[in-house]
Image (spheres, grey):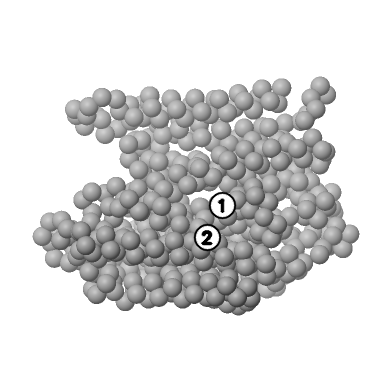
Amino acid sequence: MRGFLTILTILAGVVLAVVSYFFMAAPLGQSTNESFSNPRVPFAATGFVIGVALVFISAIVYEVLPESDSESV
Amino acid sequence: MATLTNIPVLPYGVGRIRRGWIASAAVLLIIFVVGVFAYSRQFIHGEEVTGLFDVGTRGGAPWGLYVVFVVYFVGVSTGLMLIGIVAELLKIGHMRSITRIAEGLAIISLILGALSVIVDLGQPLRGIIGFFQYARPMSPFFGTFTLVVSGALFASVVYLFLTVRPDAAILAKRKSGLATFYKWWASGYQDTPAERARRERSSIWLAFGILPLRILAYSTLGFVFGLQVGRPGWQSALQAPGFIILAVVSGAALLILVAAAARRIPGARDELSIPTFSWMSNVMTVLLVVYLYFLLAELLTTGYTSTEASWRVTDSLLTGQYAVLNWVSIGMLVLATGMGGWQMVMRNYSLSMMVAAGGLVTISAILQRYLIIVPSLTTGALLPYKEGTYAPTLIEYGVVVGLVALGALMFLAFLKLVPILEIQKEND
């Protein structure tokens, strides 16, 4: 269960960071007007920050979650 | 060497507030309050009270002392974290005793770096909200601040939390006013073989995650300067690698200074031994040679092939208004390299000489950042503006000194909450 939650946290973090960066923040196509100065979705940078943080939180999930009876290491 | 049986209830002065500590904290608090007062003047009256002015018609530098210390603090933090993690990862015996100090200092330096950014902003609140709302990934600032804020700071805190956890579990069992705090920190750690194996595994994975992230984050800060086509003196392929080398050099220098002071902590003297310092001194010396080589390569390149604007910047460093600072800074680096190299060759290390070299490098590292940032702004204009100047005001000095005092205060608090050396190791 702990391994599953750890991988889930890593995946959630990576997906959030990648989606925020490439699909919500980076303007796609050639810049034609001033709207290209802003990210496509406001607060996309916040999503990226939370994504990277989640990847590192996975280490806490891995170490701190109590061991279940069926698990060894 | 200390063992669990002969160390006091809480080792290394943790939780014990003595008169010396109170006196140091009081002095630092006063300096910090002076810094807050200086910043309040800037906040009320705007950056007009600073020496920061626009380039060109106003003949100034919009980036000054604050940005110098952003680069310095984030660099020191990067260097310290790299040293700490590499020592842990490669299990370099002598270096392991300073990893805890390195990790604590790295987090504090990063907080100070973030605060230096905030004090540099005319409208700090608008800057913070605007960053999270409107930051664009094409800008090197996006990489710098998202990776520094999210990656570096968060990852370092997670790393410290997990590495101290086994020690917290030991301390939680001892009778003290901090037992509940350590119980929370230990969060159920019982030092079973399975937990130890997990600790080992996650420590390696975290290190592999943090190392490239830290290098990437600080390189991106180098790219903030290196990618500026319109700013002669900054645009260089060597900016990012130079930033990383200087980061580790200044991190090692600060670590030597702080670790030497930490030898006064009861029980720490034996662990923080001369071989530990000699390792740091050797790392610092070897990388100093690399950094001096980078400086020389940059000087030759700009000297032979540069444009007129680029040569003006180089000339201001060699013979112009920044020549004294530049030569003093290079002289300090060369002297520190000589001191470190001499000890390395003779295999005879003196703590006072290593501390002196660390002091020289720390001062020079700040000057180097100043010389990277300011001359290009005041003398590197591509348009025909006359040469500008930048002189920090008392307000700027007050804010920076206040920030340094805040960092020292945080480190004093860190010493009273976290054992400066691993006690789990003693348990083994």
Q: Position of residue A51 (x, y in %)?
A: 50, 31
Residue at image coords 57%, 65%: B282
Kind of residue indicated by mark 2: Gly
Q: Which residue is mark 1?
A: B81
Kind of residue indicated by mark 1: Met
Distance CA(mark 2)–CA(mark 1): 8 Å
Residue at image coords 27%, 69%: B317
Q: Is the residue under label 1 in contact with that under label 2 (CB below 8 Å)?
A: yes
Left or right, B228 with respect to B140, comes to: left
Which chain is home to disc 1?
B
Residue at image coords 35%, 53%: B238
Is residue B368 visible in the rendered image? The answer is yes
Front residue of B110 and B115: B110
Which chain is home to disc 2?
B
Q: Position of residue B268 (x, y in %)?
A: 73, 66
Position of B85 relative to B189 (above/below): below
Left or right, B272 with respect to B334, comes to: right
Q: Which residue is mark 2?
A: B251
Quadrant position of residue A48: top left
Q: Closer to the N terminus: mark 2 or mark 1?
A: 1
Quadrant position of residue B289: bottom left
